[in-house]
Image (cartoon, grey):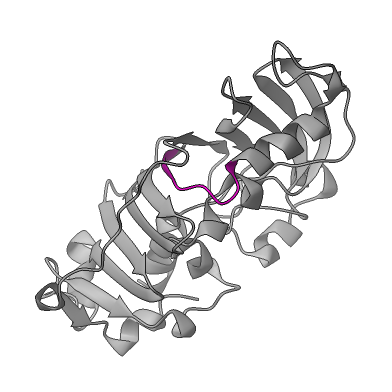
């Protein structure tokens, strides 16, 4: 049970991606721009998204789908995640909201909820969680819908090589030991050999030079399968309204929940 819930928490994570600048070959960021190193293209693309609100969708192979929104200026975020366990067919869902430092989670663990005291009767309620009790260095770190788990600049931190394929696409490799999705503990990354830690990435830019898509080709990492992790961004700079659930729709999270957030 502990393993299943731990894996569930891991995949509920807002799941982060990787990329950003080191060695590169020349490229261009737009039809009218002069040739620039691909790492500079990525740096500029990140800068153009920094501080802006946005919405996003995420997929990880065929097992995880997610969508959410970030009000970056206010520090608020929301995330919906669906995880399908291919071995058992179990479908797990979560709706996560963070507003003004408060964390709320509506979690549907299916039959597994019956095994956690306090969850069986809370299927239609948001659990109020204390972010300070969630281990920031563990699997649960990627669960929190904070900006540092999903913004492009949080993903693009370990690029080894980069190449501008076109005015709107940069490809290359990135080192997971320098920047990796937060759902993967550093201890798991450390177990990969040096070759496996360097993985391919693709970053897509819009006509304004902003990152709108990142694809990271991840290897098998312990219980997590080898698969592409893809994030699409939209609505940069648009108004994002994220509100806390009504008090009547919340219940305190059982203490046992934190034991499943390693």
Residue placed at 52% from the left, 67% from the top?
A: 141
Query: Hey, which residue is sitting farthest top in the picture?
Result: 31
Number of numbered discs visible in the structure rendering: 0
Residue placed at 30% from the left, 49% from the top?
A: 88
Residue 189 placement: quadrant:
bottom right
Position of residue 173 in the picture relative to residue 152 (left or right): right
In this rendering, the answer to whether 38 lies above or below 143 is above
Where is residue 95? Give x, y as percent: 27, 58
- Using the image as rendered, state which of residue 41 and residue 84 is in the foreground: 41
In this rendering, the answer to whether 135 lies above or below 226 is below
The reply to whether residue 59 is in sight is yes
Residue 228 placement: quadrant:
top right
Query: Hey, which residue is sitting farthest bottom in the picture?
Result: 255
Residue 110 belongs to the span the image colors magenta: no
Residue 52 belongs to the span the image colors magenta: yes
Where is residue 243? Give x, y as percent: 26, 63
Residue placed at 41% from the left, 75% from the top?
A: 101
In this rendering, the answer to whether 127 lies above or below 70 is below
Q: Quick one: quadrant of the N terminus?
A: bottom left
Where is residue 112? Give x, y as percent: 24, 66
Residue 177 placement: quadrant:
bottom right
Where is residue 246? Give x, y as percent: 15, 72
The reply to whether residue 183 is in sight is no
- Using the image as rendered, state which of residue 99 and residue 73 is in the foreground: 73
Q: Which residues are magenta?
A: 49-58
Position of residue 240 in the picture relative to residue 212 (left or right): left
In this rendering, the answer to whether 191 lies above or below 252 is above
Position of residue 150 in the picture relative to residue 245 (left or right): right
- Using the image as rendered, state which of residue 134 and residue 24 is in the foreground: 24
């Amino acid at each position: 049970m502990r393993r299943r819930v731990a894996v569930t928490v891991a995949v509920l994570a807002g799941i982060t991606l990787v990329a950003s600048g080191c060695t590169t070959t020349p490229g261009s960021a737009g039809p009218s721009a002069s040739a620039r190193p691909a790492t500079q293209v990525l740096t500029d693309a990140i800068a153009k998204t920094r501080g802006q609100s946005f919405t996003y969708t995420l997929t990880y192979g065929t097992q995880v789908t997610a969508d959410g929104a970030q009000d970056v200026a206010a520090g608020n975020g929301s995330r919906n995640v669906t995880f399908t366990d291919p071995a058992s067919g179990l479908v797990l869902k979560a709706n996560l909201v963070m507003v003004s430092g408060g964390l709320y989670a509506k979690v549907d663990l299916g039959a597994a909820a019956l095994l956690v005291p306090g969850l069986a009767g809370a299927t239609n309620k948001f659990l109020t969680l204390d972010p300070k009790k969630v281990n920031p260095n563990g699997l649960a770190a990627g669960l929190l819908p904070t900006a540092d788990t999903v913004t492009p600049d949080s993903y693009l931190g370990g690029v080894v090589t980069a190449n501008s394929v076109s005015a709107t696409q940069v490809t290359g490799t990135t080192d997971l030991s320098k920047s990796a999705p937060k759902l993967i503990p550093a201890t798991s990354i450390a177990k990969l050999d040096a070759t496996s830690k360097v993985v391919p990435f693709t970053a897509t830019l819009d006509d304004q030079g902003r990152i709108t898509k990142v694809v990271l080709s991840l290897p098998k990492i312990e219980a997590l399968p080898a698969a592409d992790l893809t994030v699409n961004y939209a609505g940069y700079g648009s108004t994002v309204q994220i509100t806390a659930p009504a008090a009547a729709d919340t219940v305190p999270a059982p203490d046992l929940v934190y034991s499943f957030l390693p």
